[in-house]
Amino acid sequence: MNLKLQFTAGAELFLGGVKDHDVEISSEIRNMRQLIKWIRDDLIQDKFKTLFMLTDDLRPGILVLINDSDWEIFDTYNYELVDKDNILFISTLHGG
């Protein structure tokens, strides 16, 4: 399955400053919970893993859009991924 992953508003720092990632994922990754764990394990730089996830959940302050809509309307972690989905991660956490 092919997905477009985007990281903005500081979340791109978790991935070396790269905002856009076109990825092909295994068919074993079927929902957002599995995708987020894959992102943590395979894309996020080690020193930022705990800033992206807290235990098995995203850290508070990271907004997620699925195809330009808030993931809350798609049942968040349970959303079943579809080929060509566009997933956007927006950090609302900023230093002062």
Image (cartoon, rainbow, N blue to C red):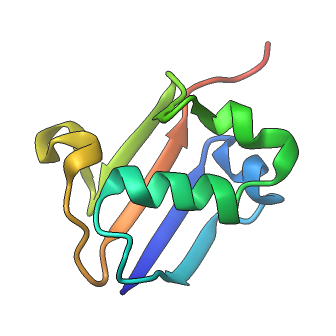
Q: Quadrant of the N terminus?
A: bottom left
**Which residue is more in the foreground, 13 or 36?**
36
Q: Residue at x 27, y 57 (%)?
A: 68
Q: Is residue 55 above or below residue 1?
A: above
Q: Residue at x 63, y 23 (%)?
A: 93
Q: Is residue 27 above or below residue 15?
A: below
Q: Where in the figure is residue 87, as x and y percent of width and height? A: 39, 61
Q: Quadrant of residue 50?
A: top right
Q: Where in the figure is residue 84, as x and y percent of width and height? A: 31, 83
Q: Quadrant of residue 21?
A: bottom right
Q: Residue furthest top?
A: 96
Q: How many marks?
A: 0
Q: Where in the figure is residue 41, as x and y percent of width and height? A: 66, 57
Q: Quadrant of the C terminus?
A: top right
Q: Residue at x 16, y 41 (%)?
A: 75
In the figure, is residue 9 to the left or right of 86? right
Q: Is residue 32 above or below residue 77?
A: below
Q: Residue at x 26, y 63 (%)?
A: 67
Q: Where in the figure is residue 3, as x and y percent of width and height? A: 41, 78
In the figure, is residue 52 to the left or right of 45? left
**Which residue is more in the foreground, 54 or 18?**
54
